[in-house]
Image: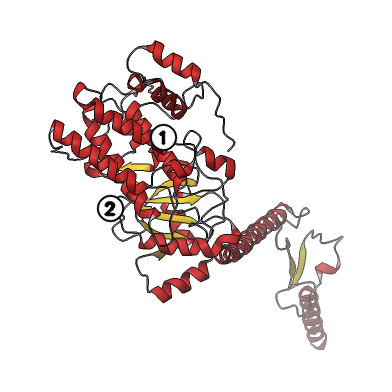
Amino acid sequence: MVKESTMKDRKAVSSFTYLRSSLWRGGAHDSSDIDECKEPNKYPCYGKCRNKHGGYNCTCPFGTRGNAYIGPCDKGLAIGICASVLVALTFLLGIEWIKYKHRIKRQDLMRKRGEYFHLHGGQLLTDMMNIENNISFKLYDRDEIELATKGFDKASIIGEGGQGTVFKGCNLDLDNNPVAIKKCKGFDENSRTEFTQELLILSRVNHENIVKLLGCCLQFEVPVLVYEFVPNKTLHYLIHNQNDPSIRTLEIRLKVAAESAEAFSYLHSLDHPILHGDVKSTNILLSNNFIAKISDFGCSKIRAADGHDDVVKGTIGYLDPEYLLKFQLTDKSDVYSFGVVLLELLTRRTPLSKQKVSLALVFQEAMKEGMFLELIDTEILHEDNVGLVGDLARLACQCLAMTSESRPTMSMIAEELRRIEKQVQHQRGVLTSISSLSLSVSSAADTSEHFTGETNGYDSLRRVAAMSIEFAR
């Protein structure tokens, strides 16, 4: 009985021992574990190893991908992420660099604006405007002018002269009225006071036959002037480029000439006389009802204290020979140039032929020879007005006298033109029903060699006067 009990106890101890051994080898209730991460040869991991109870986790590092239990992780993702970050940083740095350059450029532009404004006498002009309480004349900002001209786009150019280039602009007032914006050619730093005074004088000019100066901008390398816009074309276009004789009768030509002469006379008679310096048919604009409007002045200085100006101005074919010799611009220089305009009205020839022969020289020689009627435009020459045409021809030749003392004043010219105009109106009837100038852009005939009468007389005159007048610019 005792023996049987002992056998049962031995069997129970053996079962307990076996159970404990099984649990020690990894049973569900084992209290200890192996760190597989410390035995890489036995438990391979090609990434980041992390031990856990009963095993281990092996994952690829951040920025890589793959199965770290069986092979190395792929670093392509990391390279892609780094490249993306680098590109993003480069892009952001590029934007900041561009902003920085724009900021530096803007600061430099603002600095230059201030320098130009001071250089052109802007502060002096502002002070004078405040003293005179001149609110009709406006100082425009550079941005306004660039917007109005679309950055001085060549497509906006409506004229070029000896004193500057004229652009058509807009968006300078609430009504979006078009304006003429003139960019002057060059500027004499030593004459900023005179230039400032001239701007104020021009801003006060109020004459129906003179284009109104509205304001200026002094923030460019050269002054920019803003004028009223005259919608129709020029006297040059009326004479030389359109083919409708009904809108360039002798009466109309005299009307335009008389109004132009009165405008120049007004400028010359101011307390501080204003000399145009570039009188020509392209600078005489035509508004509604053929009203003449003098333009393209204002970039020149007002007449100096000694009565002369040493800056060369003008256009070849219109230049006063005395001015070329003495380099002194006077009111009689404008008179000479206006005499050439009168010849254009009489003959419909350009101041210089294609062979560079001067119309003024040819016409004066014709007057001496008594053959000038051969040069007169047949559209205006009739049996009943030969005497008046002769009066106009003699007036033109007086303006073209070689010495300035022999030339009439603009007021005398205007008075004589009005007298001739009245005589023509008396003979042909008062000019009526003039509405507005409508010049069609038709194919224009070349009028540089337009002539009347026989060619032999004209050719002989041209041979007599065939001297080159390639004047120095």
- Residue 367 in the image, given as x and y percentages of width and height: 39, 25
Q: Residue at x 22, y 22 (%)?
A: 382
Image mark for residue 208: 2
Residue 23 visible in rendering: yes
Image mark for residue 123: none
The answer to whether residue 471 is above or below residue 258 is above
- The quarter of the picture where the C terminus appears is top right
Q: Give the labeled residue for mark 1.
A: 340
Depth check: give the residue in front, 443 or 281: 281
Disc 2 residue crowd, few under 14, some 14–19, many 20+, Cα 10 Å: few
Viewer-nearest of discs 2 and 1: 1
Circle 2/circle 1 CB separation < 8 Å: no
Depth check: give the residue in front, 85 or 443: 443
Residue 230 visible in rendering: no
Dot 1: element:
helix
- Residue 56 in the image, given as x and y percentages of width and height: 75, 67
Q: Quadrant of residue 419?
A: top left
- The quarter of the picture where the N terminus appears is bottom right
Q: Earlier in the sequence, mark 2 or mark 1?
A: 2
Q: Quadrant of residue 117?
A: bottom right
Q: Amino acid at mark 2?
A: Glu
Depth check: give the residue in front, 337 or 240: 337
Q: Residue at x 21, y 42 (%)?
A: 289
Residue 31 located left or right of residue 183: right
The answer to whether residue 251 is above or below residue 75 is above
Disc 1 residue crowd, few under 14, some 14–19, many 20+, Cα 10 Å: many
The answer to whether residue 348 is above or below residue 52 is above
